[in-house]
Amino acid sequence: MPPPVPSLPRRVARILRTSLFAQVACALVLGIVVGKLWPDFAADLQPLGDGFTRLIKTIISPLVFCVVVVGIAKAGDLKAFGRIGLKALIWFEVASTLALLIGLLAANVVQPGSGMNVDPSTLDASAVDAKTGGGSLPSTTEFIVNAIPTSFIGAFAENELLQVLILACLVGAALLHLGHTKVPKVLPVIEQAQEIIFAVVGFIMRLAPIAVFGAMAVLIGQYGLGVIETYAKLIVLCYAAAAFFIALLAVALKMVTGLSLWKFLRYIREEMLLALGTASTESVMPRVMQKLRKAGARDDAVGLVLPTGYSFNLDGASLYLSIGTLFIAQAVGVDLSLSQQITVILVLMLTSKGMAGIPGSAFLALSATASSLGAIPAGAVALLLGVDRIMDSMRVVTNLLGNCVAVFAVSRWEGALDTERAQKVLSGEAEPRAESGEGDESAAADEAPGTDAPAPAAVPAQSAKEPAPEVS
């Protein structure tokens, strides 16, 4: 006799109880409803999203440190790690420059700001200062100097990812240099710390629906839905340009690795929805690192490429900045020449690299670009204040997918990607626990993924589950 089919309410309850994606999706819809109906109450929900983001940020630095150190030690080749870093920077520069060019071309063709005839004197330039907190973007020299840590503890305390990466590289190199004869117990301790951190990630992720509900309610309550009508042409253009860029990423991923971006998007759908709800890619960084490792990317590639991409590969921000600059110029009636538009590209190639983690960084970059041209009034940047938060979804999706594609591409380029395993994972074929050392998808939110058993007294040259790096 076949087992009885559960009723619809029971099936729905089970999905809501077991699926993080369903929980976050429901929280997203509920947040929109609350923000629309009770905007005053929605404003009080800001701490829900902020608190979740703070919790995630507390574990990002130690997680990156552990993954990078273990990755270098297991790869057993510091030169390979250096090649991964160099190839990642090349990929980042090409991708972000392409995003800038696509944005510039789209803005020239569609002319989203034409016909607005805005008088810059009527704009409140002080509102931009309030948005940015009176800050400024670092110069290239300052950016490089700031990437060098002044203290070991300070890099973690201030959550400076680039500084943590440098420290992790130094520690990983020291482990390789000393070997098992002098520090036999250090690597197992770091591996165990990594497992603890992933377990903490699982605990924090249980709060994700609450965070999404609060963040979305605040967004709708503060800005409403009317702003979409006012800036409809600009919004549609930015999202269309992002969709075109993501299509190019899909083609590049298929050509380089043979993997499907659509399957990968399904694979990280929970993380993507959470990033959309909280308007932050940092909120999903630990889980995305976890899933990239499960999908066959080697630890050292994931640990270096993904965190570095958060500072160097802001493809969505690059699209928005180039379109936003031309939108402002067109709105105030300034016709930028070809040489001035080339200047826009060159300035944004520099300013977009120092944006991560700086409040109101997009407005700082736009202001710097306007000042360098000398033709656009600085106060005109205030035109984008009302629509900036609406663009967060576009920036988050494009930035996240751009960095994930970079991990796969650079890993394949360096021979640090198990393509067969990636195909199986992205196709939804579960791997035996003993082979992969990781939990299945349904258990990911409740327990940390396992890793290879640490060597008892030595720094292993290569993980049993990872392919040996090719010589490029």
Image (tube, rainbow, N blue to C red):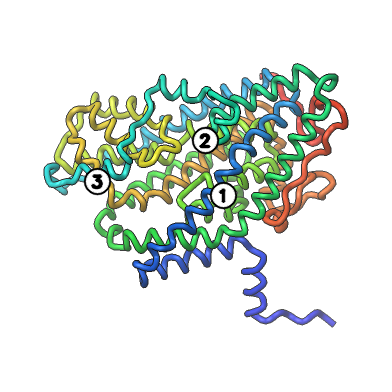
Residue at horizontal 35 percent and vertical 41 percent from the top: 360
Left-right relation of 225 to 400: left
Q: Residues within 10 Å of mark 2 (few under 14, many from 20)?
A: few
The residue beneath circle 3 is 127
The three-letter amino acid code for the residue at tag 2 is Glu
| Residue 57, position as x, y percentages in the image | 55, 44
- In the image, taking residue 214 as reference, residue 18 lies left or right, namely right
Where residue 417 sits, quadrant-wise, is top right
Q: Which mark is residue 164?
A: none
Q: Which residue is mark 2?
A: 158
Label located before the other in sequence (1 or 2): 1
Looking at the rendered structure, the kind of residue marked 3 is Ala
- Quadrant of image for the N terminus: bottom right
Residue type, numbered disc 1: Leu
The image quadrant of residue 463 is: top right
Mark whose residue sits in front, 2 or 3: 2
N-term-proximal mark, 1 vs 3: 1
* Left or right of residue 417: residue 180: right
- Residue at 33% x, 32% y is 136
